Image (cartoon, rainbow, N blue to C red):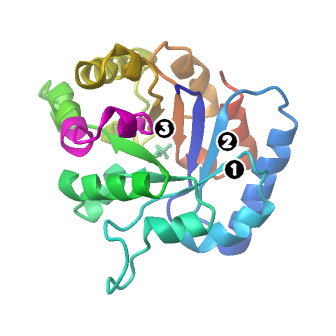
């Protein structure tokens, strides 16, 4: 079902103690926001998940930043969806552009990750986004359509219902250059249309599509006001409890 979601992606930041303190801070501030209908997710580094699970408000969706595409076995350094589930994770970010760029993740491997998430009853937050050069060539719609088509369209209608999508233009991530609300709306509407052609209008209208890329307290309100923007995937601004909760409160 389409929900408003604000997810914090901490990336490779915070020591264990800093992470626990940040999670406690978010939990505490959220308690004061009674009546807020937004689903809040936080995505700390793997090493912090177990401890953070003990201290957060149980309504916060504990989320991992990545997972293995293999189920188990001799894959040194990997962490499986099943392990993440056993640490009480409820969702996993799949295909973040930093993983695509620095760790050479391909749409075909992301497909395997998504399948494993679903078979473990975890919500995949599937990221897509174009680079600046692609937008300049006016190729951004093709790129996004391909990323969605190759990684998601093998799913059945039933499986697809569990997917959350995050549109994160690469040129906006960590740069301070946010997509304008109009640019975000244009792409989110396009994505919804692409989803509709494959899974039907009802399914497309029930999918949460988040925006990510320099989303902050001072621009979240105008981005979230757009009809096809259902929330945000927040990097830098998720590292301060007050800033993050202000974004949660921006609807
Ligand atoms: P940013 O990161 O908010 O720091 O731009 C967003 C993301 O990478 O998910």
- The numbered dot on residue 240 is 1
Instruction: Check residue 243 for magenta coloring.
Output: no
Q: Residue furthest right?
A: 32
Q: Is residue 209 visible?
A: yes
Left or right: 108, with 186 as reference point: left
Crowdedness near tag 2: few (<14), some (14–19) or many (≥20) residues, C-alpha within 10 Å: many
- Residue indicated by mark 2: 244
At 37% from the left edge and 77% from the top edge, which residue is drawn? Answer: 72
Left or right: 11, with 241 as reference point: left
- The numbered dot on residue 214 is 3
What is the distance, in whole Å, between disc 2 and disc 1 at their CAs? 6 Å
| Mark 2 vs 1: CB contact within 8 A | yes
Along the line of sight, the residue nearer the viewer: 189 or 71: 71
Under tag 2, what secondary structure? helix
Left or right: 158, with 215 as reference point: left
Under tag 1, what secondary structure? loop
What is the distance, in whole Å, between disc 3 and disc 2 at their CAs? 12 Å
Q: Quadrant of residue 132?
A: top left
Percent x, y for residue 17? 73, 72
Q: Quadrant of the C terminus?
A: top right
Which residue range is magenta in the image?
A: 147-168
Under tag 3, what secondary structure? loop
Q: Vertically, is 153 above or below 14?
A: above
């Amino acid at each position: 079902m389409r929900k408003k979601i604000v997810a914090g992606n901490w990336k490779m930041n915070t020591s264990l103690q800093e992470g626990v303190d940040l999670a406690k801070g978010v939990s505490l501030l959220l308690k004061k926001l009674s009546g807020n209908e937004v689903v809040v997710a936080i995505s700390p580094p793997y090493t912090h998940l177990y401890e953070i699970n003990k201290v957060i408000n149980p309504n916060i969706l504990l989320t991992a930043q990545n997972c293995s595409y293999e189920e188990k076995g001799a894959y040194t350094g990997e962490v499986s969806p099943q392990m993440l589930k056993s640490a009480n994770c409820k969702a996993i970010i799949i295909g973040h552009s930093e993983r695509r760029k620095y760790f050479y993740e391909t749409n075909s491997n992301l497909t395997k990750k998504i399948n494993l998430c679903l078979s473990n009853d975890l919500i995949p937050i599937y990221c897509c986004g174009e680079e600046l050069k692609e937008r300049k060539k006016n190729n951004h719609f093709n790129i996004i359509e391909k990323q969605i088509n190759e990684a998601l369209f093998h799913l059945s209608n039933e499986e697809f219902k569990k997917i959350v999508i995050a549109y994160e233009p690469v040129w906006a991530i960590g740069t301070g250059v946010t997509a304008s609300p109009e640019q975000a709306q244009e792409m989110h509407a396009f994505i919804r249309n692409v989803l509709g052609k494959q899974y039907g209008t009802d399914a497309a209208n029930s999918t949460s599509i988040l925006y990510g890329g320099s989303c902050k307290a001072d621009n979240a309100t105008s981005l979230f006001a757009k009809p096809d923007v259902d929330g945000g995937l927040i990097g830098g601004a998720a590292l301060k409890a007050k800033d993050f909760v202000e974004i949660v409160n921006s609807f």
